Amino acid sequence: MEKEEFYKRMREKAKEIHIDLSVEQMDKLYRYMDLLIEWNQKINLTAITEPEEIILKHFIDSLTILKYLKQNEKIVDMGTGAGFPGIPLSIVCNENKITLVDSLNKRLVFLQEVIKQLDLKNVETIHARAEDFGQNKTYREQYDIATSRAVANLATLSEYLLPLVKIGGKCICMKASDIEQEVQDAKKAIDVLGGTIHQIEKFTLPQSDIGRTIIMINKTKITPGKYPRKAGMPSKEPIK
């Protein structure tokens, strides 16, 4: 896709979610797309490789949570994969400090190249499993926002995210559209881990019929020290 066409499509979709992108921001997103397509031929980063789909399903989807962020917040993107939602957020809100965490080092090698090429000053990458990261005192209960996109069921995801957030902070869980049962199944876990569901927003991505849900969880009390449990346990045996 030519740069001018990318600008046009990116701008019109972003406006539908009330975001005005600068030329510099769109230029960085365009370069990010090029790197994603190029590196995806060497390592498996994403099944979405068509520019039109990258714009909608990666970039716009990532930016749907922008309205929930405030300036100068510390944000952690757990299980970031190829950098979603963390890299698009870092491009558009460069006053926030964003930590990208993933368990697969080759993804982080790609992300470090993206950070270097796009000259992103507000992003760091950390190679860790979610369970180990959440038990590390350097990071535990240090973040204003913990977010994740399509990583695990909500009960498991809560065990990954809530230990990282300060009291008064929040988890922003990015999900597909059909999540009613998942929310019910996760209520006990969220409560045990020190959280309360604050808001559930359902919507469709611009100019599509692709349904999305954002679940906002407020951190209201300290997470008990035994959570997250050892690697593999949150997914094998979610808190019930």
Image (tube, rainbow, N blue to C red):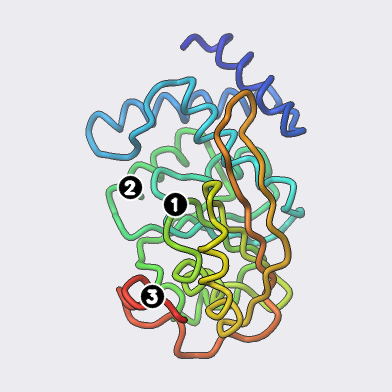
- Which one is in front, 111 or 43? 43
Q: Which of marks 1 and 3 is nearer the N terminus?
A: 1
Q: What residue type is labelled 3?
A: Pro
Q: Which mark is residue 192?
A: none
Element type where label 3 sits in the image: helix
Which residue is painted at 33% across and 34% down in the image? 47
Element type where label 1 sits in the image: loop
Circle 3 Cα neighbour tier, 10 Å, few/some/many (<14 / 14–19 / ≥20)? many
Circle 1 Cα neighbour tier, 10 Å, few/some/many (<14 / 14–19 / ≥20)? many
Q: Residue 107 carries which label?
A: 2
Left or right relative to 39: residue 197: right
Q: What residue type is labelled 2?
A: Arg
Circle 2 Cα neighbour tier, 10 Å, few/some/many (<14 / 14–19 / ≥20)? many
Quadrant in which residue 79 is drawn:
bottom left
Q: How many labels does the image show?
A: 3
Q: Nearer the viewer, mark 2 or mark 1?
A: 1
User: Residue beneath label 1, please?
Assistant: 80
The answer to whether mark 2 and mark 1 are in CB contact below 8 A is yes
From the viewer's perspective, is residue 228 above or below residue 129? below
Q: Distance between the residues labelled 2 and 1?
A: 9 Å
- Which one is in front, 235 or 230? 235
| Residue 68 x, y percent position in the rendering | 73, 52
Which residue is painted at 50% across and 65% down in the image? 154
Q: In the image as oriented, which residue stretches furthest toward the bottom?
A: 225
Q: Which mark is residue 234?
A: 3
From the viewer's perspective, is residue 200 above or below residue 9? below
Which residue is painted at 67% across and 67% down in the image? 170
Q: How far apart are marks 3 and 2 (CA)?
A: 23 Å
Q: Which of marks 2 and 1 is nearer the N terminus?
A: 1
